[in-house]
Structure formats: C-alpha cells, structure tokens
Image (tube, coloured by chain):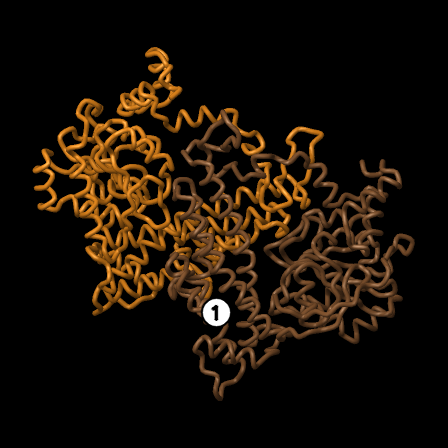
Chain colours: A brown, B orange
Amino acid sequence: MDNTRYDSDKIKKMVEERTTDESAKPALEVTLKEGIETVWDRLEKQQPQCGFGELGVCCNRCTMGPCRIDPFEGGPERGVCGADVDLIVARNFLDDLAVGAAAHSDHGREVVETLYETATGKAQGYGIADVEKLNIIAAELGIETKKRDKNEIAKDVALALLEEFGTIKNSIQFVERAPEQTKKIWKTAGIYPRSVDREIVESMHRIHMGVGADYANILLHGLRTSLSDGWGGSMMATEASDILFGTPGIKETWANMGVLKEDMVNVILHGHNPILSEMVVVAAQDPELKKLAEKKGAKGINLAGMCCTGNELLMRKGVPVAGNMLNQELILATGAVELMIIDYQCIFPSITQTAGCFHSKIVSTSEKSKVPGAIHMEFHPETASDTAQKIIKMAIENYPDRNPDRVKIPGKPMKMMAGFSV
Amino acid sequence: MDNTRYDSDKIKKMVEERTTDESAKPALEVTLKEGIETVWDRLEKQQPQCGFGELGVCCNRCTMGPCRIDPFEGGPERGVCGADVDLIVARNFLDDLAVGAAAHSDHGREVVETLYETATGKAQGYGIADVEKLNIIAAELGIETKKRDKNEIAKDVALALLEEFGTIKNSIQFVERAPEQTKKIWKTAGIYPRSVDREIVESMHRIHMGVGADYANILLHGLRTSLSDGWGGSMMATEASDILFGTPGIKETWANMGVLKEDMVNVILHGHNPILSEMVVVAAQDPELKKLAEKKGAKGINLAGMCCTGNELLMRKGVPVAGNMLNQELILATGAVELMIIDYQCIFPSITQTAGCFHSKIVSTSEKSKVPGAIHMEFHPETASDTAQKIIKMAIENYPDRNPDRVKIPGKPMKMMAGFSV
C-alpha cells in the first residue's frame, strides 16, 4: 500500500499530527510502517471533500435531483422542486437528527425488551440488579409496588415503557421530570414530544419532497424529536439498564490502550449495548473458561471496553476502557487482541480488514449490524449466557495464534475515577 | 427573468418538449412568455446534476464526511469510516425508502386518529360512511360487532390499528392477508414486519455511521420496512378512509386542466389527505356559500383535485381531477384559480411564488407542512367543518380579484371512468 513509502521522520511527524493519546502512538506507527489503512488515511484520500456537502446545500431526496444551491453567485437558488437553501439545509439536518434519535432510542427499546424478557423469565442470565431503582421508576409510572414480586413490577414497568414508543398514549412520562418553566416553553413552542417512534417517523415524513417548506417549522420538529429521544428512548435506556445491571457508582479503574495484557487473552468490547457486554463480563469470570485460558498458555482473560460500551462497563463494573472510536483500528494493530466483539454504532465497516492483518477475530452480534468478514454470533436475551460463553471460548482458542513478534502493547495505562451515568 | 428572452418559435418548441398534456400547453406558454419560473426551468438550471449524487455513491451521514467513492478509478474506494460503495448506496436507498414509508404511514396514522375522534364524537362533520366495511375490518381484527353501535366498533377498530404502529404487539394484522406461500418466504428471509413505526425507526438506526456494513442485510431491512408500510400504514389509510368516506365505486368524471370554469370560483385541492379534502367537498355544497359566490358574481363553486388528493376525491366523490404534480404551477398560470388548498407531500415549496404572479391564494392546512407565503389555516378533526367553510369563503371573496384579461382556461376536459382504490 501507499503508506509504506513514508520514511521514519515523516512517520514520526504523522503520528504526532494524528493523535495526542500516548498509548495509541506505537500502534499508529505500526499502521504507517506496515501500510495498514486507518481512518486518518481514508480522510486524507477523501480530500478535497465536497464543498456543497460540507455546507449541507445539496439535496438528493427525490428522483428530480440531485440538486445543489450555489453558495456564491450565478448558480441556481432553488432545487428542481423549488426548495431554497434554508429548506435544504434544514431537511438535511432533520434527517441527521432523526438518525441519531433513532439509533439511541432503538437501543433503548432493546434494553426495555430485555427487561421484559427478564421479568417474564425468558432471558438467560439476567436479573433485576437494582430493586430500589425499579421501585422508583414504577412509582413514577404509577405502577403498584407494595407486596408485589420484583419481576411482576418489572414486567409492568417494561410494558409501560414500551407503550411510550407507540402512538395511542401520545405522551412520555419521563418528560414530566423537566422543570415546570421548561415544560411551559416546550408547550408554547409546540414541541412537547408525544411518543418516541412517532416523532422520528414524523421527521422522516417532514423531509419528504413537497412536505413543508418552512425551515423554522422543520427545525422546531427537530427539537421535538430530540426531546422524544433525550427524555424518552435514551432516558429509558439508562433507567432500564440501571434496573438490569445496577446503578453506576464511582469506581477506580484504568484507561487507554495500555490496559491490554501481554500474557492474557485480550477481548475488546466495542459498540453501545450493555445487554451484550454485561453477559460477556459474567462469562469472562467463568472458572471453566479461566482454566481453558490457562491450558492455552494465558494467565487469564482480560476484558477491555471501547467507545460507548466501554463507558457502560466502566461505570457499572469498573472494566478498563481502551479508548474511543478512533482507537478501534489501533488496538488491533497492537497484535495483542484475540477477539473484538461488536454490536452497533461507530463500528468502522473496514474493521475486519484491519483485523485481517493480524490474528484477531471480529465477532458481530446484532442482526441489525452485520459486517462482511466478521463471524456472526447473534445475541438474543434467551440465549445470552450461552452465546457469551461461546464467544469467550473462541477468543481463548485464538490465543495460541497470536504472533509474539508483532505484539506491541504500550506502557502502563492511566489510573482514573469513573462511574457517572451519561 | 431569463425566460422572457425566448422567441415564439422557441417557446412553441419548448412547450412540446415539456408536456404531452394538451390542456397544460396554453398555461406552459404563459409561463415561458411571462418569465414565470416552473419546475422545468429549475431542472434546466440544475444541469449538470452531480454525477456522484446520481449514482448514490456520496455519503454525508457523519461529521467525518462528506465522502464519495470514485466510480471510475484512482479515487478513494472507501469513505472515512471505511464504508465501501455497496454500503453507501444501500444506506442511501434505505434512507429514501424510510422517508417514503414514513410519509405514507404517517398519513395512515392521521386517518386512523380521525376515525378514533369520529367514533368518540370529537370530530366535527365526519361520520361512519361504510358500516359494512367497518364490520369486515372489525372481524379481521377480532373485534365483536354483534349488537354494538357502529361508533363503539369504530373506536375499537381505531385503537387496534393505532396499536400496530407501536412496539408491544409486534405484529401487523393486515399482513395476514398475504398468501401463505408469500408469508413463508417473508419469514424465511427474516423480513416479516413487526410494527409500522418500529421498522422505519430501525431503518434510521441501521443507516447510522457504524451500524451494519453488510449491504444485503441493509436492503433486506428495506424490504421489511416496505412491507410494514404497504401492509401496515398505507393499507390502514385505505381501509380507514373507506370506513370514514365510503368505499370507491366506478364513476364517470372529467380530467385535465380543462375542468376549470371561467364563470365559477375555482378551488384546487392539492396534496394527499382525504381528511381535509372530504370536508372541503361538503363545504363547497353549502347553500349559504353558494349564495355568497353568486353575490360575488360567480355562478357557483368549482372544486378540482390535483395529485393524490385529486385521486382520493375522484374515486370517492367523482370530483374532477386537474392533473398530476407537474400541473400544480401551470394551473395557477391559467389565472383562474381563486385558491389552492394544500396539505402535504408533493407540494412544490415555490408554489407561493407562482401564486404571487396571479390573484391566487395558497392555504396551507397541516402543522407538518407550512410554506412561506401561504396563509396557514390549520386543519384539525375537531374543527374540520368550520375550517373548510372559512377556506371556501376566502376563495369566494377572492373571485372579484381575478383579472379576466389573464384568464386562459384550455378547452374541454377529457371524460373518463374512475374509481379504483389505490
């Protein structure tokens, strides 16, 4: 690949330009020396990026397009349908916003569905970890808690939360938590959210060709959609995760790529969904699997989080975190990762290419998020423990395939205090 | 404007190139002579359209972009995140598809909500027009019909249909109508739809940066989303409209721009929503309003439909249809339209500019679809009759402002048979 042409001075300079994370620098150097493509290379190759796209003045919503508005002079001032630049920018923004709200809220839906399956005895390995939180949420939703079994309460809580995605009730309970003055403003502006899914779907309706030409009206619905996610889907995700996996507390832990262990089976959890990662944490503590790891020559199993799943594990279990999204390729370039488990959001589609340069395996787990080249082991609450164990076993069996000559683990990780729910 | 430079031979040629609809040609000529911008002018001004956009190989989903894949050679083969061309095209396609499904299904939701408000006595002017259809749908949904009031049944039907937008039931009743063999194929492919809103929202989740890199998997979910609209939201829209406004039958009626009347108050209904247009049809028959029209010098009130609302009125009431989306500007250029009522979908954002060249008024009626320059008279089932009457009155009062010198109504309209529900 092109990258191999760089001399060592150039490589040192590039490494400094690309990251300030000291623990990431050695791996970044490896990628540059060996010509392993990373996000920074791809950004370079995309230069110059489209100026119309950067300004958001391009529209490709219907077959009369694509259209673009000239930001300078002389060019067209309206798209074929008649949309002006304000409208085009507002619609593009609402589209992006709806994608973000959908991603977070759809994750929330999965957590609430897992709560339901846990309460009804269908989920494998899960339980109600925080009964106090369960009772608080139940009270907020008007659900009776006295003299009732926690699973009965949890079932009603899950059903009440699922109802808030729908279109019959047309109100979201957690929105009531906002200060009165704030709620008044939202009502006056007509942006009080009705349901989680409804606002997202209406966003998509509003950006259709020929629906609404008033950019302010479109942006106002963007606010409503954001509220339906922030006070709806995303808030549910937090609350239901706390009930299932425990409410976070302050913990001392370690951060950066130095959390990898040279003499252990390293498993990276990358993505967003605690439903998956929490079960993997349990599986990694299985005595049988620990024995198997020793049999394969490792001292044990070392889990590390990455991206948002990293944060979920950090704040609830104190699992070390190896970095953010930009480290996902670099951590593979340490040569010390036996397996990376992915669920969804912020997974680079090229991650399996990077893994292919090493012995590392990528295991995808969500039906929503398959990646060519990954081993797909679909995660369902009903079989969660079994799947988590199978994945950890696969990681262990991959340990002997690690090439010690290519292992480059950076120095010690950084000690940190963490545990805030975000 | 630029257009005025065309000589009459050039204008004749351009008219022939732009339409085959004889009734549209005189108005098209007016726009070219007078320099009134239309959709064809804007299409010309957008030339050349972006080749990346036309191929769908451009991605602007995250702040690392915009990215584009070179369809020839030498350029980048992956976006910054690592998405390849197949993935980028598939995600763009799913985005477009979700917009279409959302638009149709959100319309369906409004019709079902109006059915609910009608059944509970909150809607003004609506009623159950087709009791036989109501009973058939009720039976399909497992709702008791014997010895029950039609409004009680309608309430239960509406609630059952609204439930299918949500995420608790996770199945759509009308999907059961499909042939067994087809359903089996859908199940095998994993595309059996769960709920209307859920599939659309999950589509938006799936096109988020870093969710799913397998284009086939993304396209499969596109099929699931389409089914949730086609057998869910859109089918509900048809069924609930039939219950509220009557099931269509074959009718003889008239089509093309020749349906305008020189000596009557011409009102155009443009958009998609029968909730609005059906009430306008009723208002236009009001004896008091007819008297007012006569007082203003007109022989009466002449309604004509346009675009999908045109079809709704055509098939249920036999109201003449003036043309499709491309005629929305031309009909204003006849100088004979007192008022155009718009709701949503396929309304050109520049329509008020066109109307501004004549005496015509544009009245927007949906909170979702405001247009700068339009008079906004929001339509709600609770005040539907009143609003429809006010709009018709406004049209009548605009009749004396028509400039007879600028009126160009084409010859006779075309007789046609219509009345198929689509």
Considering only vertical position in the picture, is A193 above or below A125?
A: above
In the image, taking residue A420 as reference, residue B16 lies left or right, namely left
Outermost residue to the front: A181
Residue A399 place in picture, x, y as percent: 84, 61
Most extreme residue toward the bottom, as rendered?
Answer: A147
Figure quadrant of residue A416: bottom right
The total of numbered circles placed on residues is 1
Residue type at mark 1 is Leu
Examine the rendering and report whether any part of residue B188 can be seen: no
Q: Which residue is mark 1?
A: A161
What's the chain of the residue with tag 1? Answer: A
Relative image position of residue A338 (x, y in whole percent): 80, 59
- Please name the residue shown 35% across and 39% down the image: B347
Q: Is residue A141 visible?
A: yes
Q: Residue at x 37, y 42 (%)?
A: B345
10 Å crowding of disc 1: few (<14), some (14-19), many (20+): many
**Left or right of A146 in this view: A118:** right
The percent position of residue B164, horizontal first and vertical second, equals 41, 60
Quadrant (top left/top right/bottom left/bottom right) for the N terminus of chain A: top right
Secondary structure at badge 1 equals helix
Asked whether A252 or B218 is in front, the reply is A252
Corner quadrant of residue B155: bottom left
Which one is nearer the viewer's eye here, A180 or A191? A180
Which quadrant would the C terminus of chain A be assigned to in this image? bottom right
Which quadrant of the structure image shows residue A10? top right
Residue at 9% from the left image edge and 33% from the top image edge: B297
Which residue extends farthest right?
A405
Note whether A158 is above or below B167 in the view shown. Answer: below
